[in-house]
Amino acid sequence: MEDAMLLDRIGMRVPVVQAPMAGVTTPRLAAAVANAGGLGSLGVAALDAAKAGEEVRQTRALTAARFNVNVFCHRPPRRDAAKEAAWLAALAPDFARFGGAAPEGLEDGYRPFALDPEMLAMLLAERPGVVSFHFGLPPADQIAALRESGAVLLGSATCRQDAERIVAAGLDGIVAQGWQAGGHRGLFDENGPDERLQTLDLLRALKGVGLPLIAAGAIMSRGDVQAVLAAGAVAAQCGTAFLMAEEAGTSPAHRAALAPGATRMTRAISGRPARGVDNIISRRDDRAAPDYPLPYSALKALHALASKAGEDGYGPFWAGTGCAEARPGTAAEILRRLAP
């Protein structure tokens, strides 16, 4: 009953959530999924409040349905000058390969939601209908403010302990993120132990936790959706399946990199564990990576430099283990392929 109530509150006719992939999701994609009966999502972690607000308003202009806005709840990075200098020195030969030089320092370009009152104010004003949290939870006062605005609140968990923290915080649902999922692991503590539970195993581990579960990880087909529903999930969250959508902001190089189907979990791109395609940067030794999100600034500069020379192996091309199964189409067509 509680599971059905969550879908009813959101207004979902199809139990499929389009994952909020920062840098790939667009207003057109989120609105198309919402209009087709699923839950569309925007990933705004890389945007400031003004730009995020623009995307929310553009989405609202395209749909009357609720949609999800995802924010990151990471802690600020611990700065270590020696560690950061060593990381840049290790990247210097890669920059030199393409006639460039490594930057003099690493930049912190991702503001945690807890330290972003402007983002909170935007969400309270624009009211997208659903707000989800990744990398942990915001302070209780921010949760209370969003709840009072009428938002449905979701949090990501990769283990029972983090799921129980989401329950205790009073949220409405849990995104159960399996090991196979593309993009960043939703670990509350990126330096803590990771049980690396596969999606179906995670659903079993979270059984009876007290909130509806939305399964994520290696869900690429109608059969995959049916399997997680049978295992106790109320809905499936699919990201990689939508990377080839016409409305997605996935670059041509990213789309092409999906076909081989090999992925890796790495900290080398951002400083946090994240799954992307197997390429030059994801194979790099990541044990000395500085704290999230510091490595991103150098990597983005390196990728831009290399891609101009025709080398896309430094791309931060997030993807789950099912990426070879991604097929092109409109968002509505992809949603129909997934719908049970």
Image (tube, helix red, strand yellow):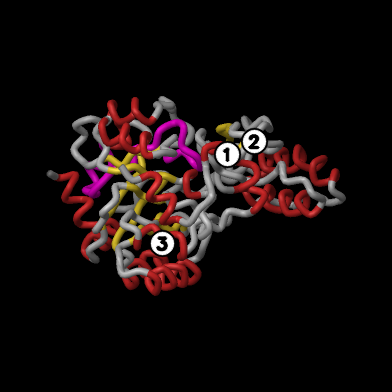
**Mark 1 and mark 3: Cα distance apart in space:** 25 Å
Q: Dot 1: what SS? A: strand
Q: Dot 2: what SS? A: loop
Callout 2, which amino acid?
Ser
**Residue 223 at x, y percent in the picture:** 36, 34
Q: Nearer the viewer, mark 1 or mark 3?
A: 3
* Residue drawn at (40%, 63%) of the image: 31
The front one of 245 and 126 is 245
**Residue 130 at x, y percent in the picture:** 31, 58
Q: Would residue 178 appear left or right of 288 to someone viewing this image?
A: left
**Label number found at residue 32:** 3
Q: Residues within 10 Å of mark 2 (few under 14, many from 20)?
A: many
Q: Would residue 177 appear left or right of 305 to someone viewing this image?
A: left
Q: Are marks 1 and 2 in contact (CB under 8 Å)?
A: yes
Q: Is residue 109 visible?
A: yes
**Label number found at residue 282:** 2
Q: Dot 3: what SS? A: helix
**Residue 69 at x, y percent in the picture:** 39, 59
Range of the magenta residues?
164-187
